[in-house]
């Protein structure tokens, strides 16, 4: 067996990790719609091959998804929140502009959240879903900021890092509402982001495992899921790769240090597996930006934005210079493919 196979076998041999329990928690949410999982696999294929510009057949698949007004709204409001400069100077803004502004791994992260957020939220009572989405938005804001400021992390990895672990809360909540309420109160009392020991006692698995399985279901391959898990649980025996492991670990290290200590490390911890330092200027900028996103009371809940938001009043950049007739035609021409359709 190779190193990765050894790690998988070692992890699965440890009863506390409860892979069977994690799979059972994820199962009620059903299979991922084929058009989404195919898009993720396509994007990962091009990312791993270092393709800067995805060839036309691949572009067309992603653009078809982006033509859906719900996904279009997700991209627009996410961009408005994190990278507003992209929206400027376009006459009018098009989905092609948004497509070209992001890398393959960025698209994989954005599309995954768009799908997962809506799919999981439909399985949870509305008043309880707030306990999932509230920390999720904080994690996404911090992760996006770290990814944009630190090239060694990157935007897509910043989004995926901590945020997926809060989406895993949906599985806990769906399985055991009372247990999740107790867990939530425990975290608040202890001022903790997670408590994996508590999770393993209550549900037989932890949030990192559930997140890793969610990644696989979405179309990310097994190697990525293992690198993600190793970063979240800091498995020192597994050598992180440059494509995924280092980036996931660095994102975890920066976000964790900021959330736990309100500071940025001067150098990456040894468990990250790479000799990366953070110059004074970068740390100062990152601290300023992180404080700003955490205190931002006007933060856009971009995952809650639906197709009805695509209109001149809320997304004016899409309709620059258009007549009323053209606006009506533009809105009507957007494909109405349900985000969870296969």
Image: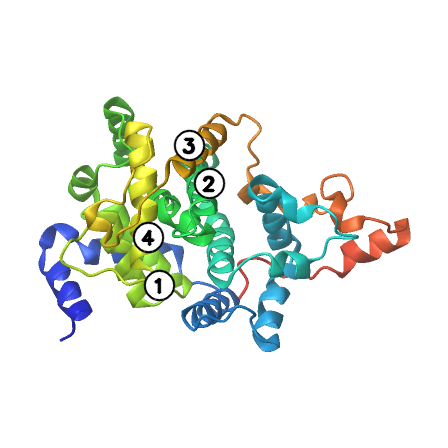
Front one among 127 and 145: 145
Tell me if label 4 and label 2 are in contact, CB under 8 Å: no
Q: Residues within 10 Å of mark 1 (few under 14, many from 20)?
A: few
Label total for image: 4
Along the horizontal axis of the image, is 7 left or right of 331?
left
Mark 3 neighbour class, 10 Å CA radius: few under 14, some 14 to 19, many 20 or more: some
Specify which label sits upstream in the sequence, 1 or 4: 1
Residue under pointer 2: 145
Q: CA distance from mark 1 to mark 2?
A: 20 Å
Name the residue that disc number 1 marks: 243
At a point 40% along the width and 70% down the height, the residue shown is: 48
Q: CA distance from mark 3 to mark 2?
A: 13 Å
Circle nearer the N terminus (1, 3):
1
Indicate the position of residue 189 as horizontal and vertical percent values: 25, 22
| Nearer-the-camera pick, 81 or 209 | 81
| Alpha carbons under labels 1 and 4: distance apart | 9 Å
Viewer-side residue, 88 vs 303: 88
Residue 220 position (above or below residue 195): below
Q: CA distance from mark 1 to mark 3?
A: 27 Å
Name the residue beneath numbered marker 3.
Answer: 284
Name the N-terminal-most of marks 1 and 2: 2
- Residue shown at the point (26%, 30%) measured from the top left: 192
Is any part of residue 65 visible from this angle? yes
- Is there CB contact under 8 Å for labels 1 and 3? no
Read off the residue under disc 4: 248
Callout in the foreground (3, 2)? 3
- Horizontal relation, residue 57 to residue 120: left or right: right
- In the rendered image of this protein, does residue 81 appear above or below residue 99? above
Identify the residue at horizontal 23%, vertical 54% (top origin): 273
Mark 4, residues whose alpha carbon is within 10 Å: few (<14), some, or many (≥20)? many
Local SS, label 3 = helix
How many neighbours does mark 2 have within 10 angstroms: few (below 14), some (14-19), or many (20 or more)? many
């Amino acid at each position: 067996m190779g190193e990765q196979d050894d790690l998988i076998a070692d992890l699965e041999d440890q009863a506390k990790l409860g892979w069977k329990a994690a799979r059972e928690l994820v199962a009620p949410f059903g299979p991922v719609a084929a058009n989404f999982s195919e898009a993720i696999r396509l994007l990962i294929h091009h990312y791993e091959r270092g393709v800067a510009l995805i060839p036309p057949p691949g572009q067309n698949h992603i653009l078809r998804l982006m033509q859906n007004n719900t996904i279009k709204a997700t991209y627009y409001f996410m961009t408005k929140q994190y990278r507003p400069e992209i929206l400027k100077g376009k006459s009018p803004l098009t989905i092609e502009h948004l497509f070209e502004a992001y890398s393959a791994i960025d698209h994989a992260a954005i599309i995954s959240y768009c799908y997962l957020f809506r799919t999981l939220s439909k399985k949870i009572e509305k008043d309880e879903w707030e306990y999932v989405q509230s920390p999720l938005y904080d994690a996404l804001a911090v992760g996006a900021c770290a990814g944009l400021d630190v090239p060694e992390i990157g935007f897509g990895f910043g989004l995926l890092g901590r945020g997926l672990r809060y989406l895993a809360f949906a599985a806990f909540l769906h399985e055991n509402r009372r247990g999740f309420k107790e867990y939530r109160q425990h975290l608040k009392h202890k001022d903790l982001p997670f408590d994996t020991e508590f999770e393993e006692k209550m549900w037989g698995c932890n949030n990192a495992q559930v997140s890793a399985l969610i990644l696989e279901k979405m179309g990310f391959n097994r190697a990525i899921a293992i690198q993600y898990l190793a970063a979240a649980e800091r498995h020192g025996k597994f050598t992180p790769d440059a494509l995924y492991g280092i980036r996931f670990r660095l994102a975890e290290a920066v976000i964790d240090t900021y959330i736990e200590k309100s500071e940025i490390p001067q150098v990456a911890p040894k468990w990250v597996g790479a000799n990366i330092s953070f110059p004074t200027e970068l740390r100062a900028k990152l601290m300023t930006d992180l404080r700003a996103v955490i205190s931002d009371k006007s933060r856009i809940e971009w995952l809650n934005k639906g197709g009805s938001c695509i209109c001149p009043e809320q997304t004016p950049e899409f309709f620059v210079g258009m007549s009323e007739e053209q606006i009506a035609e533009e809105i009507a021409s957007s494909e109405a493919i349900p985000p969870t359709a296969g």
